[in-house]
Image (spheres, grey):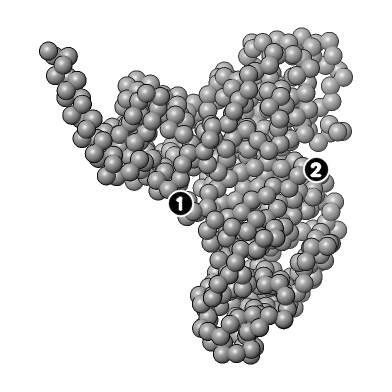
Amino acid sequence: MRHHSAVGALTGLGMLLLVAGVATGAAQESHIGNLTGHAASGQKLYKRFCIGCHGPDGDGNGENAQWIDPKPRDFTAALFKCRSTPTGTLPTDQDLFNAMSRGFVTTNMPIWEPLAAQNRADLVAYVKTFSPRFTTEKAGVSITIPPEPAISIDGILRGRQTFQKMECWKCHGPAGHGDGPSASTLTDSKDNPIRPYNFAAGTTRFMCGANNQDIYRDFMTGLDGSPMPSFADQLQPAEAWDLVHFLRTLQPLDTPEARIWRQWVATHGKDLKPIGPDNGQ
Amino acid sequence: MTNATQLCVKGTAMRLTYIAGLAGVALGASAVAGVAGPTRAGGTVSGTVTYTGTPPKMKTIDMSKEPSCAKQHTTPALTETVVAGPGNTLADVVVYISAGDQGSTTPTQSARLDQKGCQYLPHTLVVQTGQTFDIYNDDETSHNIHPLPRPNGGNNEWNKSQPPGTPPIQTSWAKTEFIPVKCNVHPWMHGYHVVLATSHYALTGADGSFSLAGLPPGKYTVTAWQEHFGVQSQDVTITGSETVPIKFVFKATPY
């Protein structure tokens, strides 16, 4: 009986929300897997959990914002760093859901996994109401990430060449310490100073996810609103995977890539050309 | 007047580099007309864009961090916020029909933007809505092209890397806007994509002159846009095939 009435109540709620959804458009909803998020529910959660930093208007000017660096995201601009979609396109609902769930290490944005998945889906729906782009445009199509090839020293060395050739070092520095020649001049799209990622910063402090697929995605989509461009037009999937494997060697971690790399450097290191302007390529 | 002289010399040097960089491309004349074909029926609006007062002095760009670009400049490159010519003329001013246009079509030919010597050539690229343009990297260094349209205005910000020797990036803009564009790797690189609805436009050269030809009889608003000084508009009426002279004078302050 109880089960029955609960289903009835839920169905009734669903009907109500469905009517609301039809009246105000699909941007009031989010779709994450089997979940459908609703902006009306998200609004209440937003006022409780998000408003302090992101502000009542979603423009990142909450009362805490002045104390925070990097600044809270301005949802009205609809520019998001962590996307699965090409540069210049809107993120998918899943992208926003993942970002919220994951939080942003190195910033004040916490992990929101303690909130139920439905709550997070509702919040995604509400966050999307701050920019009209979500009603006038569809999300971009997520990039395809082919299966990761086996890690090899040849692949890592090719990735190192790509790091040189694509001039990643101009910002991220020859050793990936975030200290390249252009590093000190970088600003985000709101003219706030921003630092390039320092691969030596430690453990798994990647903003958009810490596994190899996430890193692949970072440079193939670019981090919109930041100086990090998309390399999708420049790198073939195999080259991109080689670059991921090389980037892993820049971290002070005991990864499979780092093990292979350190072993190789111990015997062949003296033949390596330095990354940077003196590479001689 | 030392400042003005420097600016004027620079203006000429800029044009020369510009022409060299765009050899074979139909740009680089004193005024770049948006309308092809000189013998179109209708009236003409022509004149010059000048300034009074003292414009800000353009700064020397230190390209020492990018030797492959620095070596392309025999004299150090200057910023291009205000490019003044002899006789207080202003270059890189977009003069266009902002109201009264009686029908413009999107050109099928792509426009061209070059990145050369770590500068944008032209500094101000004028295109029409929906018109494709190709962005070339002529340098021996990577650039990233990072246009910054205003949010939710119909044009979306994007950011793409373009290493040396890679094919041009073809793109277009959907809505009219004055879009700043920058390269994050080379922070001094700054330019504009000016997106217009009309095909009646001109970009002034060093002599500050412009000419909008082929205007059918009617009332028009002519607008001049300069990235630092802003916009000015004037109303003109064309009755036949006459040439209506107009002048735009911007008030310049050093800061």
For the residues bearing labels 1 and 2, Cβ distance under 8 angstroms: no
Q: Tag 2 or tag 1, which sits nearer the N-term?
A: 1
Q: Which residue is mark 1?
A: B152
* Image quadrant containing the N terminus of chain A: top left
Q: Chain of mark 1?
A: B
Residue in the picture at 46% in, 45% down? A137
Around disc 1, counting alpha carbons within 10 Å, would you say few (fewer than 14), some (14 to 19), or many (20 or more)? some
Residue in the picture at 33% in, 31% down? A37
Q: Chain of mark 2?
A: B
Viewer can see residue A245? yes
Q: How far apart in space, not on screen, are marks 1 and 2 (Cα)?
A: 34 Å
x, y percent for residue B63: 76, 50
x, y percent for residue B8: 76, 73
x, y percent for residue B184: 65, 45
- In the picture provided, is B114 more to the left or to the right than B238? right
Q: Are marks 1 and 2 on the same chain?
A: yes
Q: Quadrant of residue A252?
A: top right
- In the picture provided, is B70 more to the left or to the right than B235? right
Amino acid marked by disc 2? Gly
Q: Which residue is mark 2?
A: B165
Q: Quadrant of residue A238?
A: top right
Residue in the picture at 48% in, 36% down? A91
- In the picture provided, is A38 more to the left or to the right than A234? left
What kind of element bears circle 1?
loop
- In the picture provided, is B59 more to the left or to the right than B25? left
Point out which mark residue B72 bears. none
Around disc 2, counting alpha carbons within 10 Å, would you say few (fewer than 14), some (14 to 19), or many (20 or more)? few
